[in-house]
Image (spheres, rainbow, N blue to C red):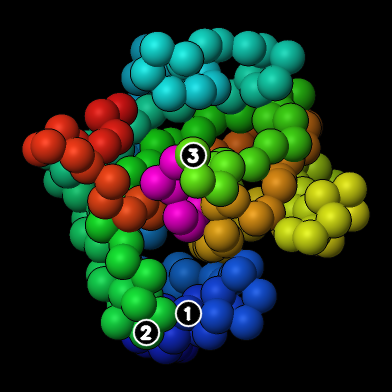
Amino acid sequence: MHTTDELFDRIAQDLRVTGLSVQTIDKTEPALQALVQRLTLFSGSDFSAAGIGRQTEHTQNTEIRSDKIHWLDSGHALENTFLTYMDELKNHLNRRLFMGLFSYECHFAHYEPGAFYKKHLDAFQGNTNRVLSTVLYLNQNWRADYGGELAIFDAHDHSILQQKITPQFGTLVTFLSDEYPHEVLPATRPRYSIAGWFRVNSSVNGQIDPPR
């Protein structure tokens, strides 16, 4: 069993070399178990249809994505356990890679059978403060034939499929937000994940960027 520091070291090394990391969190990790427990407390009304874009440009487009989401809040004890874990990862990456990461935000993503998120980038160079994207899968006993993979495309040639990642429980994917296009493929079973972003601080005149 690897320690948290060893896991964070492997993520940092992957990011330094390729900008993409696929690692597995130990199943006994309290932050992961807190998310499992949190899932048992949700009702359908806790999730809302996801949109695209920010603030005034935020819209819902079911031809692009059809998942439902719930933002994590540090005021909820179980959610805060995971947010604290990711804050430790942020600090670790800043020490190792000098990335200047400032904050982290994330949401539960619930994909019903057949739901998808078409190929997209999480950030565009010079137009956003998202630096690193993360996806953590929460699907126990997931079989490969259920589908629902995360398709990652080449950072240099966005037409080339680089790899498909099965949404197995505890799999943590971390990648440069403005380099790796990705797509969530449909599955035959409901599936859950945490989608998140590390940001740099681009606040101006005391205005925190971004407000959600």
Amino acid type, label 1: Ala
Residue 91, how many percent across, how many down?
Answer: 26, 72
Q: Which mark is residue 96?
A: 2
- Of discs 2 and 3, which sits in the foreground? 3
Q: Which mark is residue 127?
A: 3
Q: Are marks 2 and 1 in contact (CB under 8 Å)?
A: yes
The quarter of the image holding the C terminus is top left
Residue 98, how many percent across, how many down?
Answer: 35, 77
Q: For this view, does 207 lie left or right of residue 101?
A: left
Amino acid type, label 2: Arg
Task: Classify mark 1: residues with Cα within 10 Å, few (<14), some (14-19) or many (20+).
Answer: many
Measuring 36% from the left and 51% from the top, which residue is drawn there? 199
Residue 5, how many percent across, how many down?
Answer: 35, 85
Residue stretch rendered in magenta on the structure: 128-133
Q: Gap in Å between the C-alphas at discs 2 and 3? A: 25 Å
Measuring 52% from the left and 11% from the top, which residue is drawn there? 59
